[in-house]
Image: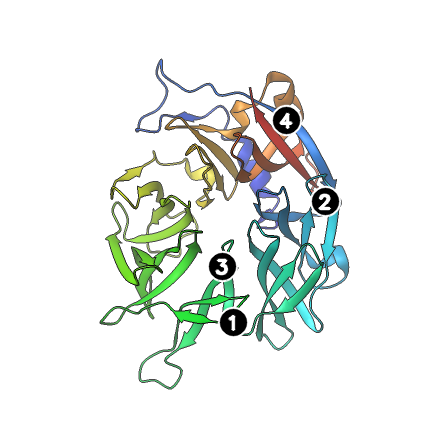
Amino acid sequence: MNRSSFLCRCAAVSLGAWFLEGCGGSGGSDTPNFRYSVDEIVTLPFIADMVARNRQGYSIGSSSAADFGTGYEGFLVSPEGAFIRVPNLQDVKTARFSAINNTGKAVGSGSYSSGVNQPFVHDIPTGVTTPITALNSPRSINDANEVLGVELRNTSGPGPAYSGGLITNLATGATETLPDPEGDTYFTGTKINNSGLVVGGLGSPLASEGVLALYDLNTRTLRTIPAGIYPGTWALFVSDSGKITGVDFELSYDPEKRSRVFLFDSASGGKTYLPELPQVAGGAVSFPLNASGDGAIGTSYGGFVYRQGRIQEINSTLSADDQKTWKIWQTYAIDDSGIIYAVGDLKGDTTAPTTTSLLRLTPQ
């Protein structure tokens, strides 16, 4: 995100004390009033895009070219709040992390000055970064070290080339191609869990994904769920028990295209839409859940807490003192105790941001 622009911080201010009930509607006597206290974990001396946090407490993110005199680089923040730089592979000019698992492996993708893509995996215990050669654009990694990414298909025609889903096991080197259904469609996965469930979308080489798709690695079966409110769909998260979060969206290039966040239970087949987020919040970009089913909805310009089936704008959940101090502009993780991890700025600072404060939001 790189804060997209300085405007995204200003936009978050406009959300104010905005509430929604999870079943639809707003306000009323049953309006949620969740409260969180804020602790600063660390201040990073650069603008950072945070991606995820694992159960061991490591967070991953990426920072901009000016910070290290190179292209984008990935970095870690340890459970103790220490910043750990992860230099790019040799000759790779820009690199970003995309996912981390609970065994200490983080994956991402970089590129050379020629534009050629170079996927990589960073092993946290050893501090070693190595190339991944079996696939492109790693999107997710589970605790069995199975990496979900894409491969370029149909490069010889007829018709356009496209990127289909591929899984590689870092331990064994084995690969598995995600199936393409019959017709002019392909399956691109976005997340893989520890139970062997891959979630993503079906689309065509000429269109965005329009069908939510689930592929079970244990049974080798593909299941599809058509988009609902809007024709496009994208999976954001899948828990080990098969709880999925995602977003249905308009198929347009309008930056203010409308969208709706949803939860889908792969066991029951139930799909629940959350109320439409305000346009000023931007679209949902992340929605991880914890073991209790609570979550943190990260958006382009802020975030929301999802708790007990209801949602509340994240800044409105802060204590009175913390609201005077902090403005949160991104949530990126939630742990099983309900603590939300976010980034923000000191409130009242109207200058262009040059630092990133990583924050811990503890439920009260």
Is label 2 in a helix, a strand or a loop? loop
Q: Quadrant of residue 309?
A: top left
Note whether 31 is above or below 14 in the view shown: above
Which residue type does callout 3 highlight?
Arg
Q: Which residue is mark 1?
A: 173
- Between disc 4 and disc 3, whose residue precedes? 4
Q: Nearer the viewer, mark 1 or mark 2?
A: 1
Which residue type does callout 4 highlight?
Val
Q: Which residue is mark 4?
A: 38
Q: Which residue does the image show at 39% across and 57% down from the upper left?
A: 253
Q: Which residue does the image show at 50% across and 44% down from the upper left?
A: 300
Is residue 347 visible in the rendered image? The answer is no
Label placed on residue 139 = 3
- Between disc 3 and disc 1, whose residue precedes? 3
Q: Quadrant of residue 92?
A: bottom right
Q: Which residue is mark 2?
A: 354
C-alpha span from label 1 to label 2: 41 Å
